[in-house]
Amino acid sequence: MYKYDDFDEAFVRERVAQFRGQVERRVDGSLTEDEFKPFRLMNGLYLQLHAYMLRVAIPYGTLNSRQMNQLAFIAEKWDKGYGHFTTRQNIQYNWPKLPDVPDMLEALADVEMHAIQTSGNTIRNVTADHFAGAAGDEIADPRPVAELLRQWSTDHPEFQALPRKFKIAVSGAENDRAVLRAHDVAVQIVEKDGQRGYRIFVGGGLGRTPMIGKVLRDFLPEADLLPYVEAVVSVWNLLGRRDNKYKARIKITVHEHGIEEISERVEQRFAEIRPSFTGVDQKLFAEIKEHFAEPAYKSSATDAFDAYKAANPAFQSWADTNLAEHKNSEYAIVSISLKSHGATPGDASSEQMRTMADLALRLGHDELRISHEQNVILPHVHKSDLPEIYNTLREEGLATANIGLISDIIACPGMDYCALATARSIPIAQEIATRFDELKLEHEVGLLKIKISGCINACGHHHVGHIGILGLDRAGVENYQITLGGDGTEDAAIGERAGPGFSADEIIPAIERLVLGYLDIRDSADETFLQTYRRLGMEPFKAILYPEKAEANAA
Amino acid sequence: MPRAFTPKVITANALLEGDAIWFTENNEWSRDIADAELITDETHADLRLIEAQAFADQIAGAYLADAKQTENGPAPTHFREEFRTRGPSNYHHGKQAEA
Ligand code: SF4
């Protein structure tokens, strides 16, 4: 795992010290809020509906047990004993007090973490496939690439005042688990004729104007990555619209100028700056890679796992749902669900964090990941250790067998916390999960991704939910709009609006109707919701959602 | 005809805790909206907002929010402002826990 070098450490400490001074001057009144706001945002500190919120970066979602324990400690000491994991692989603390924040940042620096570039018009926390380094289907671990990009972008002098924020995601597999096509730039490791290189996507993004990213370069040689990405960012830095914040993201630039023109300009700029990259970046890349060496896998019998599975149906159900294939056949990737029915998606208590940290340390090669789907991953678990992992998780309410199912919902904080929200999203997620748990239907329904955002900014990725729910304010009342057919994978699609929105009281019955209706029209138990939607289109789903209308039309 | 002015209160977040607070007639900040000054005149509202913003070392981000008069004093009219008087719905945290 990547270790801070001295420069990083000094830089982070200095930033904490600076911020401490700024907080003091704010508290004694010598800085106004207008003066202070940019400083606090630079350090990940937001002001929300009920309190401040501190957003801490977890670069490419990777943590070790020491860091997870520290997150637990911070939650306990300065917050309310829990943290919220987000779709950006960050953790948010919802209740910090302003005078405590410098101490929180200091405690983060002690474990080589920080809250820098989690806000503002900068290159944000680089995200990655949460199965990175473990997945059976990956060409290479994408995290060294993410780390290279992180180092290049952190405090990059040219990129501190971009037209708008800029998000990069990296993956090493054809199966897209990192929502590559919803990022400003995405990097996919590919191979061509035995050579390693990158496929570069540009111009994806959700929010007000959702767009699926387009391929800008199908194969970029490995050594060209930084100059090429730098060329992309600088072309956008020049062309990007600063007159209108809704048109400033690169997706709009690509849309307005067309992918051909952008590609030409990027290639031109790339040719100009390529010579200035003399290979230092490649040397750095080689060094970084060493920090991501594979763990020292153990090898032993796995029959205890099979026997336990055969004997324990609850364990079997969990194993079937929450395990993924590891590249080492004696190992498995464990997804720990932070979505127990009725709980807040993505929240973990300090005790839960400690339990997960301890399991990672003892039985998981000291690695943890945060997924954009707001769950925690133990990427390397030997199969013989799975029964113990399961039983320990169960005691902490962490063994819900629902990964990828209807109750594994992404929900942004919405109007329970977020100052930008137009409606709540958490209670909707809680109620849907509780309802389908009562119906005991979720395993029968199968793979179904519901994603909920509390406003058009789409932090809850609703556009790429098989069922997306967007909370709006309609004449002073919470109203929920449904989109269908969204997909965040390699077959990415933006969901289509189904029709008029539903009130807070109507939305849960509407989702229930929709899902039960799908069970009636799928052609077999193997056809997922999304497949049925793709086969039949919107009409039958509309008829299910709006029965009165369907009747009126038939009359 | 000028647009009718809907009654308002001045609200902000407390500087240290970030908690929702309201501006009273006595130029104090209260954690309870019921103590707030209900402002029914637009010119007066603009003036009071400037006065409220002068408390830079106690508050952050003052603004005018719609409110109505009730038996117990001013109360919010919009759900967002109502949530601010209470706290989040997923945990018993914030004001609802302090009452
Ligand atoms: S989608 Fe909107 S409500 Fe939800 S977290 Fe993002 S900005 Fe806040």
Image: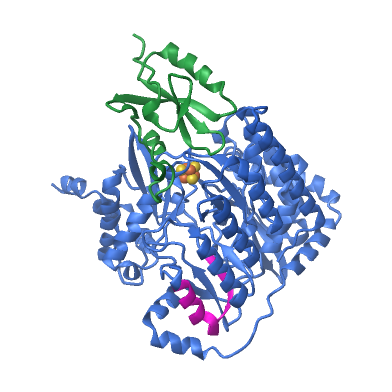
Chain colours: A blue, B green
Is the residue B57 above or below the residue A473 in the image? above
Find the residue positioned furthest to the left.
A555
Q: Quadrant of residue A447?
A: bottom left
Find the residue positioned furthest to the top.
B1
Q: Quadrant of residue A245?
A: top right
Instruction: Give coordinates of residue A280: x percent, y percent.
Output: 85, 57
Q: Does residue A514 appear to the left or right of A64 in the view shown?
A: left
Instruction: Give coordinates of residue A133: x percent, y percent.
Output: 64, 70
Instruction: Give coordinates of residue A122: x percent, y percent.
Output: 66, 42
Is the residue B48 above or below the residue A504 in the image? above
User: What range is drawn magenta here?
Assistant: A376-394
Q: Does residue A128 appear to the left or right of A147 in the view shown?
A: left
- Check if residue B54 falls in the magenta segment: no
**Front one among B71 and A221:** B71
**Front one among A207 and A256:** A207
Is the residue A395 above or below the residue A44 in the image? below
Instruction: Give coordinates of residue A311: x percent, y percent.
Output: 39, 87
Residue drawn at (44%, 41%), measured in percent from left and top?
A455
**Front one among A495 and A6:** A6
Q: Does residue A32 appear to the left or right of A323 in the view shown?
A: right
Q: Which secondary structure class fits the magenta region best?
A: helix
Q: Is residue A164 visible?
A: yes
Q: Is residue A494 visible?
A: no
Q: Quadrant of residue A298?
A: bottom right
- Check if residue A392 falls in the magenta segment: yes
